[in-house]
Image (spheres, helix red, strand yellow):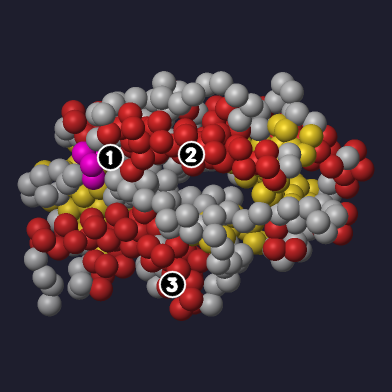
Amino acid sequence: MNSQADIVVIGAGAAGLSAAQALSQAGFHTIVLEADGHIGGRAYTEIMPDGSAFDLGCHWMHSASLNPFVATADALGVRYERRKGYGRSGFFLNGDWLEDTDVLKGWKVEERREKAMVDAWDKGCDQSVLDTVDREGPWVEVFDYFDSLNTSSDIDQISIGDMVNYNDTEENWPVVDGYGTLVARWAADVPVELNTPATAVHWGHSGVRVETLRGTLQAKCAVIAVSTGVLGSGDLRFSPELPVKKSQAIEALPLGNYNRIRLTIDRHLFDDDLPERIVVQHPGTPPMQLSLRPYGFDCVIGIVAGRYADWLERAGPEASRAVVTDALCQTLGEKFRGQVKADRQSAWRGNAFVRGAYSTSMPGQFYQRALLAQAVQDTLFFCGEATSIDHFCTCHGARMTGERAAREVRSVLGVQT
């Protein structure tokens, strides 16, 4: 590994990769350090034995008309589906399938819930979702669950600023070949030092010195593209320590948890008229979304988020497999219990290179996203989904912030020839 560079980028997720691409194209000698053995960060796809792509992390190209990865997928021939919203969903709550009229009533409840958050925000209240929305009625737990899916945290931990300010065009297009596959192919030409965790960043007006397990790098500045989970863990030390306001911003934007649990089941066992996604809730258990035979592959994918995801992850893979199997069997019949051939699941809280799913601004702390994005003494530049004020919690948001960080570096260092 070279010991000298113009810029060192720490982290090879979508943010770090986009920053490195832009800076290299501008003529800067850029070195990218990645602690893990692959690029992409929370965009990571595994190919299952049946040939299907399973995203352990992000899977949907959200806000597709604003999402730069759509054009990238088109250019690279990576398959995705165009759709409105998230596609056809069914609801099986407390032992019964809901009729369309009941589901429509539920969406009306969701509209009122969203309006309550907008109204509170417009009045200057940065408070939790819990303290803002109506807590009565049969849909409360379902929409609490949806908010947890969107933010990876529970509603008492979520600032309504996140819910109101996210730029949602309601175009959510799933990447059939895997979002991780898309990111890996998009950044395939970016040189990255894999399995090279940065352990310390010494910074000042004279530049930066970055310590790694493979040696020390000198550079004019550093782009910090790791998660707030890593920044808050102390695994990456800064000398001198980061300014107090920066540390407070990191603390105010913790990572929640969000795990995808895949069961291998023959797709032919499912009736053709079943919706592709069902939300199930049984007495005494949290709601869970199940994707049935997605894209015609032999599987069911259950999704858990927030504290429940943390609890299941600590309980272990067998517990996660069991809760998805139970939800499936309680909804569609016990015949499925003996049909589960294998399972694969993510465990983002325990991933030492991320330490969670995606960022949530805590109640009263939404403004910290903008503060986290600010550079420190024109030497340390920060990017990643947590630094976005309107596309946080997304892969395309991370990419956009990497491009923004690259522009900031160029404004300081000038134009290379």
Alpha-carbon span between mark 2 and mark 1 = 26 Å
For the point 71% across and 37% down, which residue is it? 280
Q: Is residue 73 left or right of residue 292?
A: left
- Going by the image, does 374 lie left or right of 383? left
Type of amino acid at the residue the image marks with label 1? Arg
For the C terminus, the quadrant is bottom left
Asked which secondary structure carries label 3, the reply is: helix
Residue 370 is inside the magenta segment: yes
Q: Nearer the viewer, residue 339 or 165?
A: 165
Please, what is the three-letter code of the amino acid marked with disc 3?
Thr
Pick whichever of labels 3 and 2 is earlier in the sequence.
3
Separation of disc 3 and disc 2 at Cα? Answer: 33 Å
Residue that carries the numbered disc 1 in the rendered image: 369
- 1 or 3: tag closer to the N-terminus: 3
User: Which numbered marker is on residue 360?
Assistant: none
Is residue 408 highlighted in magenta? no
Quadrant into which the N terminus falls: bottom left
Q: Residues within 10 Å of mark 1 (few under 14, many from 20)?
A: many
Mark 2 and mark 1 lie on one chain; the one further toward the N terminus is 2
Q: CA distance from mark 1 to mark 3?
A: 27 Å
- Majority secondary structure of the magenta segment? helix
Q: Position of residue 242 (x, y in %)?
A: 20, 34
Can you identify the residue that label 2 sits on? 111
Q: Are marks 1 and 3 in contact (CB under 8 Å)?
A: no
Q: Secondary structure at mark 2?
A: helix
Asked whether the viewer can see residue 39, the reply is no
Q: Quadrant of residue 12?
A: bottom left
Q: Which residue is mark 3?
A: 72
In the rendered structure, which amino acid carries the disc numbered 2? Glu
What span is colored magenta in the figure?
Answer: 368-373
Q: Are marks 3 and 2 in contact (CB under 8 Å)?
A: no
Q: Is residue 66 positioned above or below 354 on the image?
A: below
